Image (cartoon, rainbow, N blue to C red):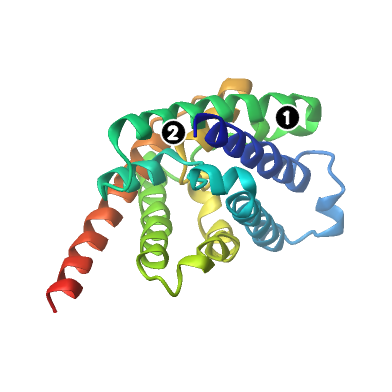
């Protein structure tokens, strides 16, 4: 399980952040090919989410469930789907994978450095509170949808499909505010290699809060449905 989460998270960051660098790095031809920033954000969000979906469908994903995000693991733990020891193993694997997956990004050179290798920071003109709220809302949305899809046998097989669609919607709306992380490991990796730790706590507290609220809301709704 440890190595599955490590490999899954490493692949997510390597592929996903390479897409970010290719789309938005200084010197990339994509600025001329697709000059509309919003369109590039939609495409990047779709491909990033699609990467996560493909990992979930792969042998790696089938081994561990492809959490590849500490707050997803926390939600599974809160719903008592995994025990505390397994949760710790998952989270350690995810953070280790985040570092391993981002180290090859150094090969992007100046392109990567121009966007801090995909590090998430509050956007220009937005406050720390704005970025924190953005992370809470987007993570709440992501974990809520995850709970809903996994909660019903009919929709469970289609769960990976929500990610490319969801992130293609959220990215153009929220990336300018916080960088759209929804995943502490996703923010940790590029922070390590770029040294960009500005307000990094936002990308722990925001996603954790959003995931916790989503878990509580979904738990209460599930109890009401069961009682009804």
| Residue located farthest toward the left when viewing the structure as drawn | 227
Residue designated by label 2: 90
Look at the image and tell me in which quarter the C terminus lies. Answer: bottom left
Q: Would you say 126 lies left or right of 110 here?
A: left
Q: Secondary structure at mark 2?
A: helix
Name the residue located 22 percent from the left edge and 67 percent from the top edge. 222
Residue 208 visible in the displayed image = yes
* Mark 2 residue crowding within 10 angstroms, few (<14) / some (14–19) / many (20+): many
- Tell me residue 163's x, y (percent): 55, 60
Name the residue located 46 percent from the left edge and 66 percent from the top edge. 156
How many labels, in total? 2
Q: Is residue 54 above or below residue 112?
A: below
- In front here: 181 or 64? 64
| Residue located farthest toward the bottom when viewing the structure as drawn | 228
> For the residues marked 1 and 2, what is the alpha-carbon distance in whole angstroms?
23 Å
Q: Would you say 127 lies left or right of 162 here?
A: left
What mark, if any, has residue 105 been given in the picture?
1
Residue 124 visible in the displayed image = no
Q: Secondary structure at mark 1?
A: helix
């Amino acid at each position: 399980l440890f190595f599955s989460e490590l490999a899954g998270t490493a692949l997510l960051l390597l592929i996903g952040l390479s897409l970010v660098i290719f789309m938005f790095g200084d010197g990339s031809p994509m600025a001329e090919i697709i000059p509309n920033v919003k369109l590039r954000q939609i495409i990047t969000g779709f491909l990033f989410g699609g990467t996560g979906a493909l990992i979930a469908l792969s042998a790696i994903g089938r081994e561990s469930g492809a959490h590849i995000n500490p707050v997803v693991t926390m939600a599974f733990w809160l719903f008592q789907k995994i025990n505390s020891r397994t949760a710790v193993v998952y989270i350690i694997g995810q953070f280790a994978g985040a570092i391993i997956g981002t180290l090859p990004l150094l090969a992007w050179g100046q392109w990567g450095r121009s966007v801090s290798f995909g590090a998430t920071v509050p956007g220009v003109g937005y406050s720390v509170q704005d970025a924190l709220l953005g992370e809470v809302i987007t993570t709440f949305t992501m974990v809520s949808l995850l709970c809903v899809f996994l909660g019903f046998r009919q929709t469970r097989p289609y769960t990976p499909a929500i990610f490319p669609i969801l992130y293609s919607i959220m990215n153009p709306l929220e990336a300018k505010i916080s960088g759209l992380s929804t995943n502490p490991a996703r923010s940790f990796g590029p922070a390590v290699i770029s040294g960009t730790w500005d307000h990094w706590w936002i990308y722990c507290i925001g996603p954790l809060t959003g995931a916790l609220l989503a878990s509580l809301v979904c738990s209460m709704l599930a109890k009401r449905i069961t009682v009804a």
